[in-house]
């Protein structure tokens, strides 16, 4: 086993002057400022009063899960000689909040739309999704079930 380090810089930007002296007196906003990369402006979940125009942790988790799956899927497709021409995903995560306000993800469904050339064996392509979970860092790290419902477009 080889360990890998990953870092990020998270900077709270929501101090309106009194810090967290009062619960409603500060914003739940921050920046992700990873050196050498564009800043990501963030807020909390809109269900909790966050800015719906900014990314929240839940957005970033489902996006990371989808992106990791996509990258491994493309890798496995390339290894299998399958020439994927396009890939886009609109993943759906379902969460719950209990009476204390604690929340968690219950499940996620990846819903990629994948374009492949005519003559491609779609059964072989679909089978690759089942292999991804064995490799994807994010999927192997989450504690909720991840399924997929891929759709394919065959190019002429």
Image: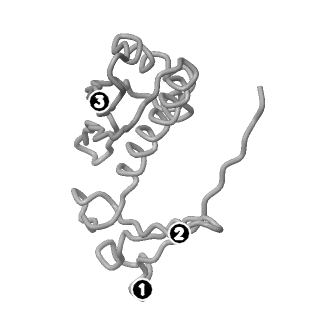
Question: What label does residue 155 carry, if any?
Answer: 3
Quarter of the rendering occupied by the N terminus: top right
Q: Is residue 22 above or below residue 90?
A: below
Work out which residue is located at the far right of the displayed protein and give it.
Answer: 2
Distance from Cα at disc 1 to Cα at disc 2: 29 Å
Instruction: Give how far across and how far down residue 51 sits, in percent.
Output: 27, 68
Q: Residue 59 versus residue 27: which sits nearer the camera?
A: 59
User: Residues at badges 1 and 3 in contact (C-beta under 8 Å)?
Assistant: no
In the visual, does 76 lie left or right of 143? Answer: right
Quarter of the rendering occupied by the C terminus: top left
Neighbour class for label 3 at 10 Å: few (<14), some, many (≥20)?
few
Residue tagged 1: 18
Which mark lies nearer to you, 2 or 3? Answer: 3
Residue in view at x 45 percent, y 77 percent: 13
User: Residues at badges 1 and 2 in contact (C-beta under 8 Å)?
Assistant: no
Distance from Cα at disc 1 to Cα at disc 3: 59 Å
Which mark lies nearer to you, 1 or 2? Answer: 2
Residue in view at x 55 percent, y 29 percent: 75
């Amino acid at each position: 086993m080889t360990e890998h380090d990953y870092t990020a810089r998270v900077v709270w930007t929501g101090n309106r002057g009194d810090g967290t002296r009062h619960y409603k007196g500060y914003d739940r906003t921050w920046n992700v400022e990873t050196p050498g990369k564009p800043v990501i402006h963030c807020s909390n979940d809109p269900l909790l009063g966050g800015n719906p125009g900014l990314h929240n942790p839940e957005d970033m988790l489902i996006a990371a899960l989808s992106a990791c799956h996509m990258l491994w899927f493309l890798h496995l497709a390339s290894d299998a000689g399958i020439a994927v021409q396009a890939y886009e995903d609109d993943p759906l995560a379902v969460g719950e909040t209990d009476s204390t306000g604690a929340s968690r993800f219950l499940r996620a469904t990846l819903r990629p739309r994948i374009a492949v050339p005519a003559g491609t064996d779609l059964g072989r392509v679909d089978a690759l999704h089942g292999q991804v979970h064995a490799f994807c860092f994010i999927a192997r790290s989450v504690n909720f079930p991840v399924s997929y419902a891929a759709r394919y477009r065959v190019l002429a």
